[in-house]
């Protein structure tokens, strides 16, 4: 996205809060949409595949906007681009609210991604390149409150608002945040801030963009369909992956030779940055696969209500905010930030193994203690990781590095949901096959003879629920072991300290 050196730096708490609210609107909406998946599906009478296609449409559109975001900022300036994005996001959110079927919601989500898909990237790059160094630490802390704060409230707000007003409410809740961001950014950003005179919309390499978006769509579609075609045969999925990877490779080749590339990929070969992307990939993979499995486990396997799930996740997420505030206060006492990342991965290992060992009648308190460990992982891994990953990138290349990281975020999120779904269904099938006719009744009878009562804490009477309970446990165990493996790699590598 190129840094515009001739613009004066700007700072002020109103601006910082406005930027934080802008990113909060995007991430808050994404959290609401993921957490309320089952309710949205029921509301628009969509199948799981149709819902996945809606999510895919948003992700691909967001990636397209991230690719071109730097160009639009240079063309229109930060003020016009941010305000235009927020206005567009609000209007598209209202369209989502009016949708009555999968096609209408899919089209509205595409429009929503045109406005909201770049808010995370644009706001973070703005802080790094246009806030004075002396005030940047304060700006980043306010920004992180925008990233984690409203998102922590998303599960409780989603569950309570859906109960009161229906599934459409989740598309209205982020609008006030976006409008407040608008009110704060409008007077604090200079009109042409970030604009470059010699850039025009016609400078976009449309052919290259079209080909890479076709490639990204092919990769994302292959990952999504893998989830639904795993048991019936992979079929065309390898072909989609080959086409997608081939087109993405062509884009990389084209960008390294273009005089004004959208992404200066040839300058992103820094070893610390690449190592950071590796850990980002696993962070997003573990976080998003867990976001898919956890509600399934809590509601479908253990039988807790949607409201209870929302309350539990919000309480534990608020605990994560306290951990973040403690990090802000005490992290400066350690010259190395790696110990925080080590602790985060240990917490994720404890969470994964602990969830796998939970009895079928586990209390909300027991689940909450373990879920608090996941909140520790979310905060203490990604905040130090962000600083270490981009520390060696010059400011004029930071934007390109952050764009690339957020493209990785969108792709890994799709992969994570596919991996989580396939693992749950595969393990559930295996556990169901293992349970031969008469298995459930005989097993309960045996345990009843030993314990003196039939309602054992380790056995659910419904075969489907019990198989799902065991399958989710297997996935949690895998997540814990994966976190442990990543921990060993973190300790072994020497780039991120």
Image (cartoon, grey):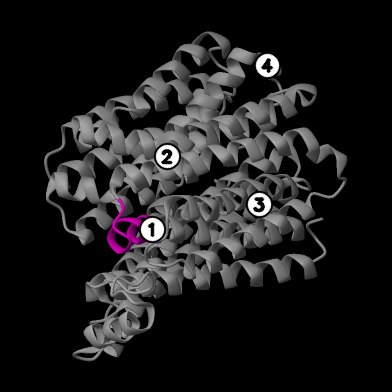
Q: Are marks 4 and 1 in contact (CB under 8 Å)?
A: no
Measured as percent of width and height from the top left, residue 432 is found at 27, 83
The earlier-in-sequence mark between 4 and 3 is 4
Q: Which mark is residue 117?
A: 2
Q: Main secondary structure of the magenta part?
A: helix
The earlier-in-sequence mark between 1 and 2 is 2
Residue range corresponding to the magenta coloring:
293-304
The earlier-in-sequence mark between 3 and 2 is 2
Magenta stretch: residue 295 in it?
A: yes
Left or right of 21, for residue 395: right
Left or right of 102, for residue 268: right
- Secondary element type, mark 3: helix
Residue at 59% x, 16% y: name it.
Answer: 15
Magenta stretch: residue 278 in it?
A: no
Q: Which mark is residue 292?
A: 1
Residue on which the image places disc 3: 381
Q: Assess disc 4: are there few (<14), some (14-19) or many (≥20) residues with their C-alpha within 10 Å of its C-alpha.
A: some
Residue on which the image places disc 4: 10
- Secondary element type, mark 4: loop
Left or right of 350, for residue 435: left
- Secondary element type, mark 1: helix
* Residue 392 drawn above or below residue 50: above
- Secondary element type, mark 2: loop
Residue at 67% x, 48% y: name it.
Answer: 380
Q: Are marks 1 and 2 in contact (CB under 8 Å)?
A: no
Q: Assess disc 2: are there few (<14), some (14-19) or many (≥20) residues with their C-alpha within 10 Å of its C-alpha.
A: many
Determine the CA span between mark 4 and mark 1. Answer: 40 Å
The quadrant in which the N terminus is found is top right
């Amino acid at each position: 996205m190129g840094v515009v050196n001739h613009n004066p730096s700007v700072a002020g708490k109103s601006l910082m809060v406005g930027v934080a609210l802008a990113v909060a609107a995007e991430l808050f909406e994404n959290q609401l949409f993921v957490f309320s998946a089952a309710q949205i599906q029921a509301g628009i009478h969509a199948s799981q595949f149709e819902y996945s296609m809606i999510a895919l449409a948003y992700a691909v559109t967001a990636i397209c906007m991230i690719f071109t975001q730097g160009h639009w900022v240079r063309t229109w300036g930060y003020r016009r681009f941010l305000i235009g994005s927020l206005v567009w996001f609000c209007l598209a959110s209202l369209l989502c609210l009016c949708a009555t079927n999968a096609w209408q919601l899919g089209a509205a989500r595409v429009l929503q991604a045109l406005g909201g898909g770049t808010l995370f990237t644009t706001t973070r790059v703005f802080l790094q390149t246009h806030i004075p160094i002396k005030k940047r630490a304060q700006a980043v802390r306010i920004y992180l409150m925008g990233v984690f704060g409203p998102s922590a409230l998303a599960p409780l707000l989603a569950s309570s608002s859906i109960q009161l007003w229906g599934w459409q409410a989740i598309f209205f809740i982020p609008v006030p945040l976006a409008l407040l961001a608008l009110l704060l950014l409008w007077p604090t950003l200079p009109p042409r801030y970030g604009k470059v005179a010699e850039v025009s919309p016609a400078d976009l390499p449309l052919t290259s963009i079209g080909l890479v978006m076709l490639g990204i769509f092919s990769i994302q579609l292959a990952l999504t369909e893998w989830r639904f075609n795993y048991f019936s045969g992979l079929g065309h999925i390898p072909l989609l992956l080959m086409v997608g990877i081939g087109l993405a490779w062509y884009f990389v080749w084209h960008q390294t030779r273009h005089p004004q590339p959208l992404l200066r990929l040839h300058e992103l070969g820094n070893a610390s940055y690449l190592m950071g992307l590796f850990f980002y990939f696993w962070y997003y993979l573990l976080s998003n696969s867990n976001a898919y499995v956890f509600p399934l486990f809590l509601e479908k396997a253990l039988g807790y209500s949607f409201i209870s799930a929302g309350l539990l996740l919000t309480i534990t997420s608020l605990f994560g905010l306290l951990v973040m505030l403690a990090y802000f206060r005490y992290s400066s006492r350690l010259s190395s930030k790696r110990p925080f990342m080590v602790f985060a991965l240990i917490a994720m290992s404890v969470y994964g193994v602990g969830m796998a060992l939970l009895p079928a009648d586990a209390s909300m308190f027991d689940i909450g203690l373990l879920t608090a460990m996941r909140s520790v992982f979310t905060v203490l891994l990604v905040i130090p990781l962000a600083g270490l990953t981009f520390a060696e990138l010059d400011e004029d290349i930071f934007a390109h590095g952050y764009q690339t990281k957020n493209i990785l975020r969108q792709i890994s999120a799709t992969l994570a949901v596919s991996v989580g779904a396939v693992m749950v269904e595969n393990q559930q099938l295996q556990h169901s096959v293992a349970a031969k006719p008469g298995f459930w009744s005989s097993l309960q009878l045996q345990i009843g003879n030993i314990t003196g009562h039939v309602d054992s804490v380790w056995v659910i009477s419904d075969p489907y629920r019990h198989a799902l309970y065991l399958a989710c446990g297997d996935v949690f165990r895998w997540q814990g072991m994966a976190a442990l493996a990543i921990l060993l790699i973190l300790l072994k590598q020497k780039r991120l300290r």
